[in-house]
Amino acid sequence: MSLHDCCAAAASDHRCEAIRTWTTDGSQQSQTRVRWCLNLGEWLVPSVILVLLPKCPACLAAYIVMGTGIGLSLSTARTLRLLLMILCIASLLCLTVRHRHPVMALIFRPKGIR
């Protein structure tokens, strides 16, 4: 296994520890802890926003007023809530397709393989 030039220079540094992960084609690759945390953050940020997003537009307006001091009308809060939901779901779908998640492999499996 060959290291990247940037990792070879920092291999003596204990902070740049490599984590081995398996790719979808079965090969093994190394990732630094920073990259692993960034990959995890890509999934966590939209997931947490989606989970903590209130169901009621009035509650969203109240949270925004408490956090920022900016008042919103209910129609604006409803539109903002819908926009946040669409953006979070779209980003999670893009991540799923990009990483070829095992769930996608189960859904889009060829018909002959069951």
Image (cartoon, helix red, strand yellow):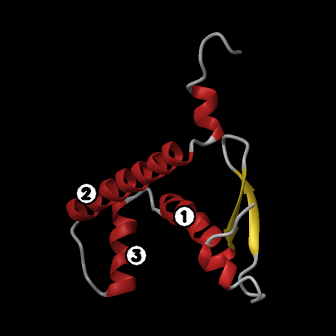
Circle 1: residue type: Val
Q: What residue is shown with label 3?
A: 63
Mark 3 vs 2, N-terminal side: 3
Question: What x and y, as percent, mark residue 108?
Answer: 55, 25
Q: Under tag 3, what secondary structure?
A: helix
Circle 3: residue type: Tyr
Mark 2 vs 1, N-terminal side: 1
Q: Please give left or right for residue 55 compared with residue 40 in the image.
A: left
Q: Are marks 3 and 2 in contact (CB under 8 Å)?
A: no
State which quadrant residue 59 falls in: bottom left
Q: What residue is shown with label 1?
A: 48
State which quadrant residue 25 falls in: top right
Circle 1 crowding by C-alpha within 10 Å: few under 14, some 14–19, many from 20: few
Q: Under tag 2, what secondary structure?
A: helix
For the N terminus, which image quadrant? bottom right
Q: What residue is shown with label 2?
A: 79
Question: What x and y, as percent, mark residue 112?
Answer: 65, 10
Q: Under tag 1, what secondary structure?
A: helix
Q: Nearer the viewer, residue 29 or 2?
A: 2
Q: Are marks 2 and 1 in contact (CB under 8 Å)?
A: no
Q: Nearer the viewer, residue 52 or 75?
A: 52
Q: Are marks 1 and 3 in contact (CB under 8 Å)?
A: no
Q: Please give left or right for residue 61 compared with residue 13 in the image.
A: left
